[in-house]
Amino acid sequence: MAEHTREGEENGVSGCMSSVIPGWFSEISPMWPGEAHSLKVEKILFQEKSDYQNVMIFQSATYGKVLVLDGVIQLTERDECAYQEMITHLPLCSIPNPKKVLVIGGGDGGVLREVARHSSVEQIDICEIDGMVVDVSKKFFPDVAIGYEDPRVNLHIGDGVAFMKNAPEGTYDAVIVDSSDPIGPAQELFEKPFFASVARALRPGGVVCTQAESIWLHMHIIEDIVTNCRQIFKGSVNYAWTTVPTYPSGVIGFMLCSTEGPAVDFKHPVNPIDANESACKSSRPLKFYNSEIHTAAFCLPSFAKKVIDSKTT
């Protein structure tokens, strides 16, 4: 649980609530200065330092179990569907018959669970740097980590940047980069050389979807991501977003790009997973994603649209 100074009193502001609240987890980060999101903690279930980061899981009062890495919420049982389903189906529903899919990061297994819905997929590779994240997810989040049980999944514990560099050219139909924020072990996943290696590993007309931060907090980071992707990917370059209540600002974005080759129109899915759910190899119904929300995800507020359009046209 994060504890912090009584900021209101230090600043001489009377009547401010103390930010030292016993029994609450508060997410404080230089990535979103001047604000915090708090969840009431019922019980800390796991807390340990891996080779790469601090890993904590707690039972919250309102969002179920919560996975926290280096003080940043990665998922909660209540709202993980909004992230996992969107980061997966936005790219996979935009191309016909994806067969080979690579997941970078995503050690909790949620993206694997969603990729497994696509019956056309024959091979699902995942490269996660932190084995502890995989292990604790299997123990504490079985409904998320169920993705590992699919026989098409091949797990590689290691550095995603190195894995991408060594991937044979033109291997994958889709790459999904489920990364944490661009600080610490995930920083390289937001840089131009990494995007170049992703493009190389994709087939012509292949697609990538990467976590791309919040339009409310990180437009400067998003500008850089869009600029890099526009230089690397010669097909489509689009930005989409979704709502995730426990992420900073309540929204998170995705960068969706395709390589030169068969045209990809991300805004109009050609492979509607929700219309063919009986064919999916997953019994869990979709909670968030549908074809309408797929198209709506690319509708941007004016302030974000102006910046992003200036970089993609």
Image: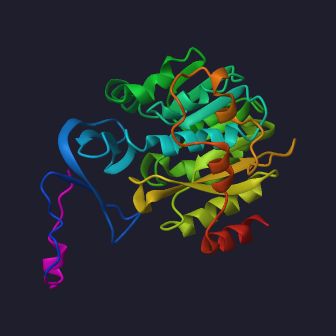
In the rendered structure, the answer to whether residue 1 lies left or right of residue 248 reads: left
Q: What's the residue at 54%, 29% (across, down)?
A: 112
Farthest residue to the right: give it. 262
Can you say which quadrant of the picture contains the C terminus?
Answer: bottom right
Q: What's the residue at 77%, 28% (across, down)?
A: 97
In the rendered structure, the answer to whether residue 14 lies left or right of residue 139 reads: left
Q: Which residues are magenta?
A: 1-14
In the rendered structure, the answer to whether residue 190 lies left or right of residue 129 reads: right
Q: What's the residue at 38%, 33% (across, down)?
A: 133
Q: Is residue 186 visible?
A: yes
Residue 59, given in percent of the width and then of the height, sits at 24, 39
Q: Quadrant of residue 2?
A: bottom left
Residue 277, given in percent of the width and then of the height, sits at 64, 27
Residue 275, given in percent of the width and then of the height, sits at 69, 33
Dominant secondary-structure state across the stretch colored magenta: loop
Q: What's the residue at 68%, 42% (across, down)?
A: 91
Q: Nearer the viewer, residue 71 or 298?
A: 298
Residue 10 drawn in magenta: yes
- Report the number of numbered marks: 0
Residue 189 drawn in magenta: no
Q: How is the image coloured?
A: rainbow
Q: Is residue 177 visible?
A: no
- Say above or below: 151 vs 64: above
Residue 179, given in percent of the width and then of the height, sits at 51, 45
Q: Quadrant of residue 142?
A: top left
In the rendered structure, the answer to whether residue 74 lies left or right of residue 12 reads: right
- Say above or below: 179 vs 51: below
Q: Quadrant of residue 80?
A: top left
